[in-house]
Structures are given as structure tokens and as C-alpha cells.
Amino acid sequence: MATIQEVTRPPHRLDDVPGWFPVLDQLLFDWFLSRQETAGTRGDLLEVGVYMGKSAIFIGRHRQPGEKYTVCDLFEGDAPDDANRAESSKSYSALTRRAFEENYLSFHDELPRVLQGPSSVVPEEVEPRSCRFVHIDASHLYEHVHGDIGAAHDVLLPDGIVVLDDFRSEHTPGVSIAAWEAVLNRGLNPVCLSTQKLYGTWGDPEPVRDELIAMVQERSDCHLSIQDAAGHRIIRLKSKGMPAPSFPLSRHAEEAARTTSTASEPAPAPVPTPAPATTPAPATAARPARPAPRRGIRARRLAVDLLPPVVTRAIRNARSARN
């Protein structure tokens, strides 16, 4: 389980979100909600007390088209009384609405309807007989839990499921008293108990109990025991190395994977630039070499130029006569 101090980056996995949501309860949430959907049950979803959003994120995956999803928490708001104020300061001083919303939007495209205030606002804001699933994980004080259970009774459909957190922890006796009081005096039928939570309904518990027992008996990673107490058949479940149900990674993990994939791709090999084509220069026609004059001709020409003019004319006239 991640804590606030350990979280230094946006959550990549559901387990990165701070909070208390054991694997067995993840399995049971998924089973109860999926069973309703398979049976065609339609109804809204409600969580009272969200902390950093771990279970709220999980529930949000089961919101069907047309269904409303509401969450309620004080966040950093004022508590309604001194006892609740002291409880919030001690256990939830780091909780802010912004932290919850950022965690939720890491896994979903839109937020649920958020009620910031004490859980006493729920009856005014959530329609009676509108919900199929309610998770109560807010104050541990008896008076507040008593009121939250009453609100759950009013907003649930006849066969809806309510989940009460911390019903038997040593530091939450107020929750224990309110939970078992609801079973003994207020008509709540327990369906099963996990290590942390009581699952119940104000409807007929037998069909869902039978189906749950059949599901668990097919698993080797869940211990099952059944007891009778005060006229109730109570199913007790305990994990035996149970793996967590599969849950999608957050958008931050997807973005990191894309970035890593892009960075690890080898750079494309450079395309060699072809050398520019060279056009051979046109060949220049070679001039025929002038034949060198013969030595005898040069000597005669020189002699003619040096003789007296009378002799030179006689030689030239004789040469013309020969030609």
C-alpha cells in the first residue's frame, strides 16, 4: 500500500494511490458490482469517505451509461463537530480535494459528482431508492456511522449492497457498535465479512450468499467459513495469497511507455546523398599541328633575303618560269 510520503510521482498503477483497499475487497467489490450488471440491475453508485481515491477509482470502472456516481468527503473542509475535527486532523490532515481529483483523473476521463462536506449532506443530495451499491468509509465515530448507515438504507434499492469499512478494527469501536446495531435492530442482513469490511443488504440475502459461496468454493486462494449468529448465516472470507484483480494502468503510465518506446527506437540510418552528376566537358577539336618547314627551304629563303636585289629578282623570275 502506498502512503502519501512514498508517492513522488503521479500514480501509474492503482496500488500507487495511497489508501487501504485489500486485494480480497477488490475481488469482492468487482464480484458484487459485476453480478448486478450481469443481472441487469441498474442504479447509481455512492461512496462516503474517499481519502485519496483508491476504492473510488475502482468503483468508477463499474459506472454504466446513464448511472450517476457520487462521492462525499470533508477533504480540507470544516468538520461539523469537535470530535470529528480532531479525528480529521489526526488521520487525514494531508487529504485535499485536489489530490483526490488528480488521482481519480489519472484513471478516468471525468470526475464523479463530488460533495465536499460532512456525510450528513448525503440524504439531501442523493435520491431515495436510487443506488445499487454504497460504500461507507468516512468517520469512525458512532454517531456519524449510525447516520451514514441510515442514509445508505434510504438511498439503496431494495436489493442493493452496502459495504461498511473498519467494522471490527480495534481502533474503531464506534463503527463496530453501529454496524452490529444495524444488523440486530435495523434490518441489515450481513452477506459476508472480509478482514476489513461488512457486506450487507436490506433485501433477501440468500440468493447472493449462495452465489458467493459457489464462487469462492471454486477458488484455491480464498479461505471460506460459515457461521450462524443471532439468526443470520454469516460468511467469513480470508485471502490466501490472492492476486489483485486486473486493473488498467493510468494515463501517466501510458504516456511514460510511449515516451520510453520513442526514445528506445533506433535513429533511422542517414540516407546517403548522391554525388552530383558531372557532365563531361565537350571535347575540343584538336588543331592539326603545322608541319615544321624543312631545313633546306629555310636556308634558301634566308639566302634570297641577303642577296643584292638584282640577283634576287633573277632568282624569283627563274622560279616563276619553272612553275
Image (cartoon, grey):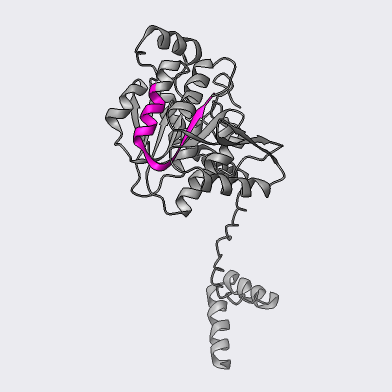
Query: Residue 79: percent from the left, percent from the top?
Result: 36, 13
Q: Which portion, as a residue range, is magenta? A: 147-166
Residue 70, above or below 76: below
**In the image, residue 165 lies in the stretch drawn in magenta:** yes
- Dividing the image into 4 quarters, which one contains the C terminus? bottom right
Specify whether residue 10 is in view. yes
Q: Residue at x 55, y 65 (%)?
A: 277
In the orientation shown, which residue stands out farthest toward the front? 231
**Total residue callouts:** 0
Q: Residue at x 49, y 10 (%)?
A: 90
Q: Residue at x 67, y 73 (%)?
A: 299
**In the image, residue 185 lies in the stretch drawn in magenta:** no
Residue 280, above or below 150: below
Query: Residue 54: percent from the left, percent from the top?
Result: 51, 31
Specify whether residue 13 is in view. no
Residue 90, above or below 11: above
Query: Residue 59: percent from the left, percent from the top?
Result: 47, 39
In the orientation shown, which residue stands out farthest toward the left? 124
